Image (spheres, helix red, strand yellow):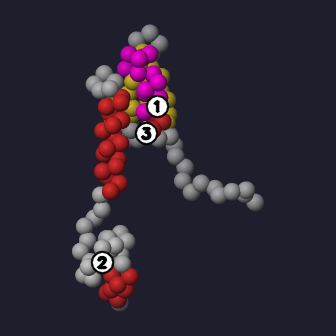
Amino acid sequence: MASGLDPTEEYDGSITVRLLDDQTGTEKISCSSYEEAIEIAKENQYSVTVAKIVDRDGNVVFTSADMDIDDWESVWRQERRRQSVTVEEYDCPYDSVSCFADDLCVQCKIDKVQNQY
């Protein structure tokens, strides 16, 4: 019997920080999150020639040759916040202020069920 809850998802660490140094070559570090990747880039930004953050699709999303990590982090956090508050527009026929497309009010849920039959 398990002593706690088992994770429902596993993450493969596919966000990568690449540290390129003219003397030592390239070091790849797998990260479990963008926050971790940002911290690693910050820690190493002055000790390597170029630090890069590569996303899950293999796209370079940050390179220290083009931008400061603090500036990039600020833009990344703003975009993440913007995306988390974006909600699909939905006009409730009952004018309920707490009715959204992904979280219907009781009346809209009833209508939806009735329309299925």
Q: Is residue 117 magenta?
A: no
Q: CA distance from mark 2 to mark 3?
A: 37 Å
Residue holding disc 2: 96
Residue sitting at 30 percent across and 51 percent down? 82
- Kind of residue at badge 2: Ser
Q: CA distance from mark 1 to mark 3?
A: 9 Å
What segment carries the magenta color? 38-50
For numbered disc 3, what is the local secondary structure?
helix
Q: Are marks 2 and 3 in contact (CB under 8 Å)?
A: no
The residue nearer to you, when weighing 90 against 48, is 90
Residue sitting at 31 percent across and 22 percent down? 65
Assign the C terminus to one quadrant of the image. Answer: bottom left
Crowdedness of circle 2 by 10 Å Cα count: few (<14), some, many (20+)? some
- Kind of residue at badge 1: Glu
Q: Is residue 48 magenta?
A: yes
The residue nearer to you, when weighing 15 against 96, is 96
Q: Residue 5: which quarter of the image?
A: bottom right
Residue 116 image point, x, y percent: 34, 85
Q: Which mark is residue 34?
A: 3
Residue sitting at 34 percent across and 73 percent down? 98
